[in-house]
Amino acid sequence: MEDGVSNNNNNRNEEKKLGSWPPRTAENEIRMRKSTPAPFLMKTYRMVEDPATDDVISWNSDGTAFVVWQTAEFAKDVLPKLFKHSNFSSFVRQLNTYGFRKVRTTRWEFCNEKFQKGEKEKLCEIRRRKKWRNKRQHEVDEDQRSTSSNSSSSQYITLMDENKRLKKENGALSSELASMKNKCKGLFDLVATYENISKKEDEDVRPKLFGVRLEGERERKIKRGEEISETTTILLSQSCK
């Protein structure tokens, strides 16, 4: 009996030894973390790869970077599905901590040499920058941002986009107005020139019949021109106010 109990204890000890292999040392845990991509990177890769949201976020033409085409829609509809917040500025800060950089000034395009289309296995090689690795304080995911802060950021982005659109429309209207003013000025100058020429024709050379001067073709043209000039001046003064 004692031999049987001793054998059972030995077997249990062996199982415990086998079950704890390899030993859970700090070095082994670090190695395991390095072989697994960060959740933020996996979620971001899923968003970029999803063809259903290509009009909002997608790869660039050669797959070396991704572009957020519509920031307002991205913050409102896409971010909350994976990150539980709608803070676009927070998302950009997270990208910065993983070494992403904005490569275009005209659009939100982000690049990391290890974050590319068709190379998902390289995500585990992307590391957070050291200055953001201050234990729990900087390991806490940006998903924990307050709802009020997220809402304010989303509204700010929407207002910025609307402001850009209005500025563009205002520029187009200003250009059109300047063009119309130039046309009006040209027409006024033309009318003034025609009137000056007409005034110089002060010599009346029409023939007389029984003491009454006859109206010739030239006089009819001058009279018609004066009528047209007067009508044009009235119309232009009304349309150019």
Image (cartoon, rainbow, N blue to C red):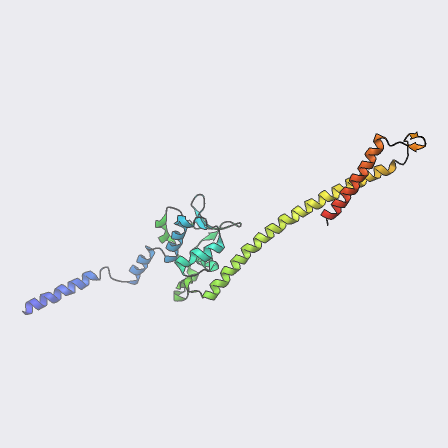
- Residue 236 vs residue 120, the one in the foreground: 236
- Number of numbered callouts drawn: 0
Q: Is any part of residue 162 visible from this angle?
A: yes
Residue 56: horizontal and vertical position, in percent?
A: 46, 51
Please tell me which residue is depicted at 62% across the width and 51% down the height of the picture.
Answer: 170
Q: Is residue 218 above or below residue 87?
A: above
- Answer with left or right where residue 23 lies relative to residue 130: left
Q: Quadrant of residue 199?
A: top right
Residue 160: horizontal and vertical position, in percent?
A: 55, 56
Residue 83: horizontal and vertical position, in percent?
A: 40, 59
- Residue 137 vs residue 55, the one in the foreground: 55
Task: Give the residue furthest to the front.
Answer: 210
Please tell me which residue is depicted at 16% across the width and 65% down the height of the picture.
Answer: 13
- Answer with left or right where residue 232 lies relative to residue 41: right
Task: Give the residue furthest to the left.
Answer: 1
Q: Is residue 182 above or below residue 73?
A: above
Task: Give the residue furthest to the bottom.
Answer: 2
- Residue 190 vs residue 66, the one in the foreground: 190
Please tell me which residue is depicted at 92% across the width and 33% down the height of the picture.
Answer: 212
Q: Is any part of residue 114 visible from this angle?
A: no
Specify the quadrant that holds the N terminus: bottom left
Residue 105: horizontal and vertical position, in percent?
A: 53, 50
